[in-house]
Image: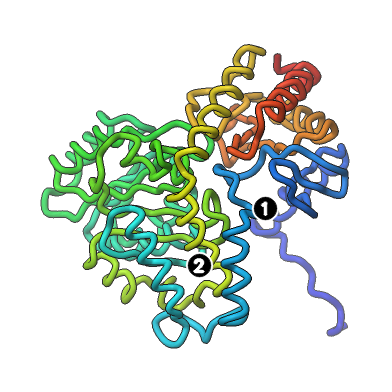
Amino acid sequence: MLNQPPAKPRDGLQWRIDAMVSRVEDAKSKNAYYYQQAVQEIDGAWVITEEGRKLMFATYSYLGLLKHPYIDQAAKEAIDRYGTGTHGVRLLGGTLDLHLELEKTIARFHGRDDAIVFSSGYVTNLATISTLVGKGDWVISDKWNHASIVDGCTLARGHFVRFRHNDMADLERRLKQAPESAGKLVVADAVFSMDGDIFPLPDAVELCRKYNARLMIDEAHSLGVLGDTGHGIEEHFGMPGVIDVKMGTLSKTIPGVGGYITGDQELITFLKHAARAFIFSAALPPAVAAACKAGFEVIEQEGVERNRILRRNVEHFIGGLKARGFDTGVSVTPIVPIMTYDEEKAFLMTKYCQEHKVFVLPVLPPAVPPGKSRLRANVTAAHTPEDIDFALDVFEAAGKYAGVI
């Protein structure tokens, strides 16, 4: 019968679909599936879900700027002035004065000539790397880089190689392999999203200059986190202006959505006229652009104090976990892996935490290597010392329940 749905082909695609569905259904059958859990309300470091009030440890709002009154007001005023959308893509009718103001704000914040804003952080890396790296060029990526960097390297037409995580000797080995005449782009996260450790910027800069390579750093998890005023990895190491291609997101410390590249005028002009994901994507909505601009302004005004509180909370949390017997890896930032190694133990710990008012989620292969499952707990400046003590007690009980400690 023509009106019957077609039979599903028994091919590799269907096998992958079936395998993922089976994995999800297995977790749901054990009441241990907490991904895509709907947050209904935000109250400081706490959130309201269908299951009740929970302390949020699965957030990227490192400085606690969600629901900041100045940022919210900027977004509301932008809707009143511009409406909810734009006239389309930025290159044609979609650019507002607000977009240009946001890009100038980002450039000033980072001490650069100009900036370009994309519709998401993922798209920013994908578009920038694939645009900068052409045929005959080399792109050299840290092995632990974010998936968006890996996908950008894969999409690029150049030669893609990796170096061992934070291993500068291996980076130099890769740079030596590249032809002297080839364009070379070294790419790394500033703070690595699964382990919370920091890229050794001084050594990388020295190598890039020695081998005539450009350096691109993804500041997604370092903006607002590193440096005394939250200006990122260059401030952290006292090396202003050394990064050639500086990338950041507008959905973590900055409470909006989008991503950006900031650098010299020639780089930004090139990307605005060559990066397909910029040319063919609609502009950020006015409310988002206004909120992001206001977010940078708040960091300039309040960043020192919020960053001080964040560092205090990170030390309190990591120290407390270690004292209770947990392995937190090499993290020195708000991204704190609580290692379970075993997937089942990660699910058990998560279930216990969620049932005892702590919102945290497991990270499993393939997001991390096999045998490296964990809970990833993110600390923010919105957490109080009492919040952290409460969470530590829950994590300890969960760890014992799951047999992790």
Q: Are marks 1 and 2 in contact (CB under 8 Å)?
A: no
Visible residue check, residue 210: yes
Residue 378 figure quarter:
top right
Q: Which x, y percent locates residue 296? A: 46, 56
Q: Which x, y percent locates residue 94? A: 47, 83
Residue at the image position 40 percent from the left and 64 percent from the top: 127
Q: Which callout, 1 or 2, points at the residue further toward the start of the chain?
A: 1
Circle 2: residue type: Ser
Residue at the image position 81 percent from the left and 29 percent from the top: 352
Q: Which residue is mark 2?
A: 119
Visible residue check, residue 143: no
In the picture, which quadrant includes the C terminus? top right
Along the viewing direction, whichever of 232 and 28 lies nearer the viewer: 232
Q: Which residue is mark 1?
A: 16
Residue at the image position 51 percent from the left and 77 percent from the top: 282
Mark 2 lies on a secondary structure that is loop
In the picture, which quadrant includes the N terminus? bottom right
